[in-house]
Amino acid sequence: MGRSSTVKETQALFQSLRSAYAATPNNLKIIDVYVGFAVLTAVIQVVYMAVVGSFPFNSFLSGVLSCIGTAVLAVCLRIQVNKDNKEFKDVAPERAFADFILCNLVLHLVIMNFMG
Amino acid sequence: MPPQTMSAKTDATIGVNGTAKSTSNQAPPPMALPANLKSDLLNKLSLKSFKLKTKQQELLLRVSILFLVYVLAFITRLFSVLRYESMIHEFDPYFNYRTTLFLTEKGFYEFWNWFDYESWYPLGRIVGGTLYPGLMVTAALIYWGLRFLRFAVHIREVCVLTAPFFASNTTLVAYFFGKEIWDSSAGLVAAALIAICPGYISRSVAGSYDNEGVAIFALLLTFYLFVKAVNTGSLTWSLASAFGYFYMVSAWGGYVFIINLIPLYVLVLLITGRYSVRLYIAYNCMYVLGMLLAMQIRFVGFQHVQSGEHMAAMGVFFLMQVFYFLDWVKYLLSDKRLFETFLRITVTTTVGLAAVALGVGTASGYISPWTGRFYSLLDPTYAKDHIPIIASVSEHQPTAWSSFMFDFHILLFLFPAGLYFCFKRLTDATIFIVMYGLTSMYFAGVMVRLILVATPAVCLISAIAVSATVKNLAQLLRTKSKVTQGGSSKAASGSKASSKALLDQSQPFQRNGAIALLLGVFYLLSKYATHCTWVTSEAYSSPSIVLAARGAHGNKVIFDDYREAYFWLQQNTPTDAKVMSWWDYGYQITAMANRTVIVDNNTWNNTHIATVGRAMSSYEDEAYEIMRELDVGYVLVVFGGVTGYSSDDINKFLWMVRIGGGVFPVIKEPDYLVNGEYRVDKGAAPKMLNCLMYKLCYYRFGELMTEYGKPPGFDRARGVEIGNKDIKLEHLEEAFTTSNWIVRIYKVKPPNNRW
């Protein structure tokens, strides 16, 4: 009835999502893997903090924020490199990558200062 | 003759006679036909060279205007240096000066780890972790830079001139910001307006070495870089805005305004359907990097993840992730219906999670609520009832209309006009400036001090109004035969009839109307400049530590009593003597007299201040006990009865009572009032006539003739004859009274020998 139709809908949803995602170019998939890795690391750190407590809070924050930060920067890179984004048509992918590297450099320098 | 035809042609078409020179050394051609060809060619050349020249002329014009505005912003703030001398003004700058001195003498390591035992005796103060280091580090860097270039400047000169220097830099940033929002002419007008606007000058004159001098520059820079990042979607601009935010956090506690305005702006863009990937890139990069950089300042610490004032930014951060995710899924899915199902699931889960997280965080106390200082901005009556020390600061009072007029002049009515123009051309950038303007004007209405934060927004928006109006009027002037639409006239000038003319017959009338309106604009702007200079000269250039008045014969009389008293303290008291005074003078005493104080302007410990307040409002015996507990050696009071100086301790006395009574219920405010009235003459309350503050201020005053025709003991600041003229002090003795009786210092006598 209603339930089976929603189940069917969600199944159709997942199917179309999977097929559409398979069509994305490889360089974007690599960036997606990197983002997934960063978020996973952050989740692991949060779980660890929940287990052992957050005593050197600055270390915890710096660890989690470095993961979140690099994930967010990678998503920005993905946006700028994606050929379907018309707003960034005239931005060379090398320039986008250089921006990404620069921001990551600043991020990790601050993290190293903050970690204590 | 060929030269004649040349000049005639150029005059007819362009009207600039510079081009005649470039064509003057052509040899006259022998025949008529080549002459025509050659004249055509020369004409084209002159046109081309004219085009080059226009661009160069424009660039020259812009650069020279900006240079003049830069110099103007600097020199209009130098009134007090020219009239008195190059010294630090007011109260707070003395602490900043002292810390900068410490930094330049001892270096960074000592500075970060400085524990100051000379203030808040016996508690001390961890200076390294409780100040915003931006201002001191900036001044120290400038000082070291100048020293490296072998300019032998003293750190005091650098400190005095830091604020005007950064005000000039602010005008440059205002130009670029105006260029980003509207166009370069609006930028030029904005730079010119902000160079002399009294709202900004009040806190950035030479000598006013306070955080705001640098912070407003950092604020405008951060906003400009962020708007640039949103417009271009580039990671480098977002990184730059994160650094601008870091500089702002290091400079002033008002950075909370930025970290709440930018998320609010992003939210407004999302709601109005202006979500774009550029916004995503700009906000995310700025938020993550900015937050991390901000947490490097020890005073800010972990507030970005723990304080309620910063939660809006985090909420919008998560919201942006959700938006991006939804956008990406929408792009992946081709079927609209599937996307709608997905949308429903996602939105419900997100909202539920967010509500749960916020609820748990606030209820468990992990996310601290809004602190008193910022909560009183949302609820202006809060401080008056609960936190008297915040309510007592004169800068925290609500703003009167006269203050707005005084500080903004014509910008006050140009602001709504500029809002109109912004709404006509809505882009991401104009939405930002509108939001900045409206929020800052609201807060400026709540607290006088925050007019400073509203000033850049008001100047920018007014610049848009001025620039757009003048452009339209000038266009009206330039069109000779075409019919143009009526230029949008300013709301103030009522000659709408001329601007609505659309027929050929009324065209000269239109031109005359445009000329009249342009003259009106010129008149208003010149009035603005006059007003600003007058305000700067009369109201905002007083050092507060040196008072000036007109003598009986019109000559200028200068009261240098404060510094006289501080130097007396420095030279005539033991080096470990403790001085008790009201907290206003704490910074000055530590900086100039170099003595330990009990409380100072930092006001971080309310109970300690209340103890001092209690001591000042008690009878001499009880006060003596408190003073012995605190090891007080000297008491300093400020008294304006002889000179008519109205910011003295007797006028501030009720605040001492209120603050003291807030912690020690033994002090009750009605004890000092008579029928709710505050009096110091014969009809005053008996507790008032015998409390320590009264005795110290009016000791020996009863014998003094202050004004011709009035009895001795006539208090010129209150305008009454004092009630208790026969004052005897038991536990204190008078140590020093300055030449105009403004500062009085008393020595606390050791306890009597038993027998």
Image (cartoon, coloured by chain):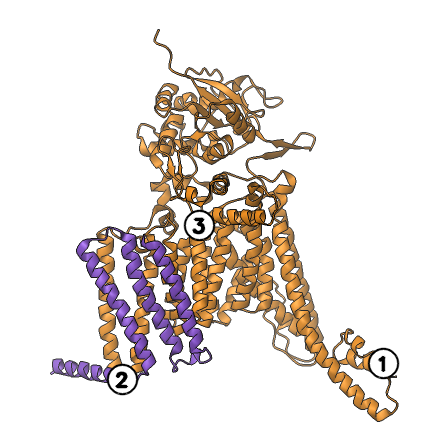
Q: Which residue is mark 3?
A: B252
Q: Which chain is orange?
A: B
Q: Indicate the amino acid at tag 3.
A: Trp
Give the Cα separation between the discs numbered 1 and 3: 65 Å
Secondary element type, mark 1: helix
Share a chain, discs 3 and 2? no
Between label 3 and label 2, give the one nearer the viewer: 2
Q: Which residue is outermost to the top?
A: B755
Q: In the image shown, does A101 or B726 lie closer to the viewer?
A: A101
- Whether residue B719 is visible, yes or no, is no
Q: Which residue is mark 1?
A: B3
Q: Indicate the amino acid at tag 1.
A: Pro
Callout 2: few (<14), some (14-19), or many (20+) C-alpha neighbours within 10 Å?
Answer: few
Q: Indicate the amino acid at tag 2.
A: Ala
Q: In the image shown, does B90 or B189 lie closer to the viewer?
A: B90
Q: Which chain is purple?
A: A
Name the chain letter of the residue that bears numbered label 2. A
Asked if marks 1 and 2 touch (Cβ < 8 Å), the reply is no
Query: Is residue B316 positioned above or below A96 on the image?
Result: above
> Which sits earlier in the primary sequence, circle 1 or circle 3?
1
Callout 3: few (<14), some (14-19), or many (20+) C-alpha neighbours within 10 Å?
Answer: many
Residue B481 x, y percent position in the rendering? 70, 81
Residue B333 x, y percent position in the rendering? 28, 83
Residue at 40% of width from left, 68% of height from top? Answer: A101
Q: Which mark is residue A22?
A: 2
Q: Which mark is residue B11?
A: none
Q: Quadrant of residue A113?
A: bottom left
Callout 1: few (<14), some (14-19), or many (20+) C-alpha neighbours within 10 Å?
Answer: some
Give the Cα separation between the discs numbered 1 and 2: 75 Å
Query: Is residue B559 positioned above or below B308 on the image?
Result: above
Residue B323 x, y percent position in the rendering? 32, 72
